[in-house]
Image (tube, grey):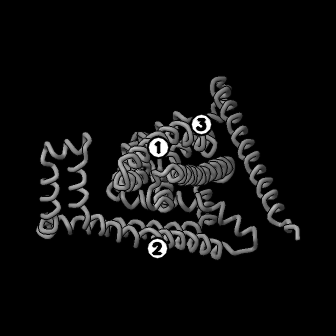
């Protein structure tokens, strides 16, 4: 078989595989999301294993902890939310009347445009419109069911990947030929897994910062008499929603802003201003810095990869953007640049040396932070262990 025949068959085969994958892209994305979550959870699993637990018990403990947190959050938030939504729906006509009676620009606008009467008519006709729109109701129910099915699928696959991750890593290494290619493949897999784990850890850090800062600001507003109801669950929701790239910030801010405006116009404006300011700080300061240390990507690469993958594949693309970019960087540097350096390319050598320096700095910073956390926990433990004077 000639070279051109083999090349043509190879290209056709690759295109056929890509076309098949594209036809089931939704399933592929769910699998990739599960793999990213499993790899990100692996450091916690290994930490529990070092304490004498089996891998299965460690995975079960982590999964039970996450499930308990979700159920606790739902128990704290859903019943008050349902009750408040019902009260809000009952009191909408009263709120509309109050808005129309206000002696400010908003009240005058309501009176001049008869917006109050239109809103009252819309609220009065809403039950009949919902009942008559049976197809819309079915469509919404179908999307909700599909979302729940996807979440359950991701959870099950994540648990499976967490259990079998060591075996999967060995199997992936065996895909490379024995000798130097297999050693190179082992390096690429180890570094890619490390980058993905760093991404998940960094995402958790930014979400904790988001939730804690929101709770802090809500507490300050409360001190000055413009507090927001349900401050704690709203701050927790802001932190949880911040895990979702691109749109998570808006999903986390929307409930707090809405509740703030229903509490008082001043509270709503202040909460909205806070979230707008915080998102600028997070997008251009916190996330690039945290992700640079976590996945060793420059701030520009973090922003561009998130925008590009998010535009191509939506929410799932934004979620997988940084792991994909970090993996591509590992493949390029380990599988391409080191060969160019071995061939005597001075530009490749300079680029690789710069990369290695950045890698060493990131490791040194992570080690310093870990030691600082250990010292802080030790001091806290020592203070708590001291007996109070009798």
Question: On the image, numbered disc 3 is attached to which residue?
Answer: 336
Q: Position of residue 370 (x, y in %)?
A: 74, 51
Q: Which mark is residue 274?
A: 1
Is residue 188 positioned above or below 53 on the image? above
- Asked whether, in this view, residue 376 is left or right of residue 197, the answer is right
Frontmost residue, 371 versus 260: 260
N-term mark: 1 or 3 = 1
- Mark 1 vs 2, N-terminal side: 2
Quadrant of the rendered image containing residue 365? top right
Mark 1 against mark 2, which lies toward the viewer? 1
Residue beneath the point at 46% across and 36% down: 304
Q: Position of residue 1 (x, y in %)?
A: 43, 46
Badge number at residue 253: none
Q: In front of the other: label 2 or label 3?
A: 2
Instruction: Give 92 or 256, whichever is nearer the viewer.
Output: 92
Horizontal side of 156 relative to 265 (left or right) equals right
In the rendered view, does 93 fall on the left or right side of 269?
left
Q: Residue at x 65, y 47 (%)?
A: 184
- Which element carries disc 2, helix, strand or loop? helix
Task: Compare residues 308 and 20 and report the one nearer the observer.
Answer: 308
Residues under numbered marks 1 and 3 in contact, where contact means CB atoms less than 8 Å apart: no
- Sequence-wise, the earlier of marks 2 and 3 is 2
How busy is the neighbourhood of tag 2: few (under 14 within 10 Å), some, or many (20 plus)?
Answer: few
Q: Are marks 2 and 3 in contact (CB under 8 Å)?
A: no
Pick the front one: 3 or 15: 15
- CA gap, disc 1 to disc 3? 46 Å
Q: Any mark on residue 75, and which?
A: 2
Position of residue 152 in the picture relative to residue 360 (left or right): left
Name the spot of residue 291 as percent of width and height, x first: 58, 43
At a point 71% along the width and 74% down the height, the residue shown is 53
Q: CA distance from mark 2 to mark 3?
A: 52 Å
Mark in the foreground, 1 or 3:
1
């Amino acid at each position: 078989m000639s070279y051109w025949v083999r090349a043509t068959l190879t290209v056709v085969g690759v295109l056929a595989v890509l076309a098949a994958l594209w036809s089931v892209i939704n399933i592929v994305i769910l699998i990739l999301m599960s793999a990213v979550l499993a790899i990100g959870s692996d450091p916690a699993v290994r930490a529990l294993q070092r304490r004498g637990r089996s891998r299965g018990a460690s995975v079960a403990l982590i999964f039970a902890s996450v499930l308990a947190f979700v159920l606790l959050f739902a128990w704290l938030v859903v019943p008050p939310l349902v009750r408040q939504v019902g009260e809000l729906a009952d009191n909408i006509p009263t709120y509309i009347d109050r808005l129309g009676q206000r002696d400010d620009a908003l009240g005058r606008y309501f009176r001049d445009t008869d917006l109050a009467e239109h809103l009252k008519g819309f609220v009065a006709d809403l039950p009949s419109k919902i009942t008559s729109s049976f197809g819309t109701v079915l469509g919404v129910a179908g999307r909700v069911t599909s979302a729940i099915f996807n979440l359950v699928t991701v959870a099950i696959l994540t648990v499976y990947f967490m259990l079998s991750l060591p075996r999967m890593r060995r199997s992936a290494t065996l895909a490379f030929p024995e000798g130097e290619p297999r050693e190179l493949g082992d390096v690429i897999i180890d570094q890619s897994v490390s980058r993905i784990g760093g991404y998940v850890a960094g995402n958790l850090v930014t979400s904790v910062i988001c939730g804690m800062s929101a709770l802090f600001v809500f507490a300050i507003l409360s001190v000055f008499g413009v507090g927001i109801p349900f401050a704690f669950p709203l701050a927790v929701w802001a932190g949880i929603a911040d895990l979702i790239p691109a749109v998570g910030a808006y999903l986390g801010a929307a409930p707090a802003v809405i509740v703030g405006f229903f509490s008082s116009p001043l509270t709503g404006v202040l909460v909205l201003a806070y979230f707008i300011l915080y998102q600028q700080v997070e997008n251009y300061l916190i996330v690039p810095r945290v992700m640079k240390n976590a996945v060793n990507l420059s701030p520009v690469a973090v922003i561009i990869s998130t925008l590009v993958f998010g535009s191509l594949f939506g929410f799932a693309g934004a979620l997988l953007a940084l792991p994909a970019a970090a993996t591509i960087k590992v493949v390029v540097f380990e599988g391409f640049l080191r060969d160019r350096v071995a061939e005597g390319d001075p530009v490749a050598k300079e680029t690789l040396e710069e990369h290695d320096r950045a890698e060493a700095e990131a490791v040194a910073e992570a080690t310093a932070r870990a030691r600082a956390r250990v010292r802080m926990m030790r001091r806290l433990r020592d203070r708590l262990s001291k007996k109070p004077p009798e």
